[in-house]
Image: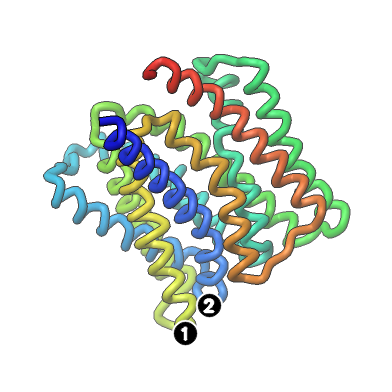
Amino acid sequence: MDNRQDTNIAVELALLVALATLWGGSYTFIKLGVATIPPITLIAARTAIAGLLLLIVMRARGIKMPTDAATWQRFAFQAVLNSVIPWTLIAWGEHHVDAALATILNSAGPIFTFLLTAVVTRHEATTPRKLFGVVAGMAGILLIVGVDTVHDIGSGIIAEAAIVAATICYACAAIFGRSFRGLDPMAPAAGSLLAGAAVLIPASLVVEQPWTLSPSLSSVLALFALAVFSTAAAFAIYFRLIQTLGSVGTIAQAYLRVPIGVAISVAFLGETLSRTAWIGLACVVLGVAAMTIPAWRQASVKTS
């Protein structure tokens, strides 16, 4: 019995690392994709492909997609916060900054989520450890962006600000996403992706005229990897882990994907980080970990 339980835990932890790798690798896929595919077109294709794949998975699992207009309006609003704006900002930002830097700046979602819930909804308990996490994470972001501002007030700093803005969008989406209670978690994921595609595809046709493009093979392969693995497969793994490890355990990927994402961009894109960026990376990982590990420990004690 214990051996079977240990095996199950090992499988779930392996899936957790896989999830962190898939999401961490998405920044490298985006960097390769935007080399010859404009941002809106890249993200339009990403949302359409991933949304359709999740819809197929839902059909296979017998999960029905809601059909009422009110739910789809919420899907559309969630899409704006969780994919249309942030994914486009990140894709545009990676035209000007390295994937490794984007990984670090975009990893502070739990920190901004805590700040927004503490200030706006006021349902998040404030503890010294969480406050330390906020200070450490914000210090890491300001260290990276602030130093770059001193050296170069140009497209680089604007791109970094865009990626931070995308992170704030994720935080808003996380808060709004709690309104989908009662639905299978895969339904809002697929619904918001399809709603996002419905917005992004017309925008791509008007703004970027994709039929005029000549994307490279590496960009096309990166797009499909981004949609299939870092979006559809990642969501499928994420929702499984929510059921097996719980939301608190699953959030551990938030700090695992930062070093993994940076390592992937360094290994496959040949990127390098400045000493300041490495310090910022350490601060952000420390901050996010400080806000998630304590709750995981408490949850583990309760179930043991």
Report whether residue 302 is seen.
Answer: yes
Assign a secondary structure to mark 2. Answer: loop
Please provide percent x and percent y for residue 257. Answer: 54, 48
The numbered mark at residue 36 is 2
State the residue at coordinates (30%, 31%). 2
Please provide percent x and percent y for residue 8. Answer: 31, 39
Relative placement, left or right, of 224 versus 65 is right
In the image as oriented, which residue stretches furthest toward the right? Answer: 150
* Mark 1 and mark 2: Cα distance apart in space: 7 Å
Assign a secondary structure to mark 1. Answer: loop
Which amino acid lies under the numbered mark 1 shown in the image of this protein? Ser
State the residue at coordinates (61%, 45%). 165
State the residue at coordinates (64%, 49%). 104
As displayed, is residue 299 above or below residue 19?
above
Task: Locate the N terminus by quadrant.
Answer: top left
As displayed, is residue 71 above or below residue 258?
above
State the residue at coordinates (83%, 59%). 152
Task: Locate the C terminus by quadrant.
Answer: top left
Report whether residue 93 is seen.
Answer: no
Relative placement, left or right, of 26 versus 199 is right
Location of residue 203 (image quadrant): bottom left
- Mark 1, residue position: 214
- Out of 218 and 37, give the one closest to the viewer: 218
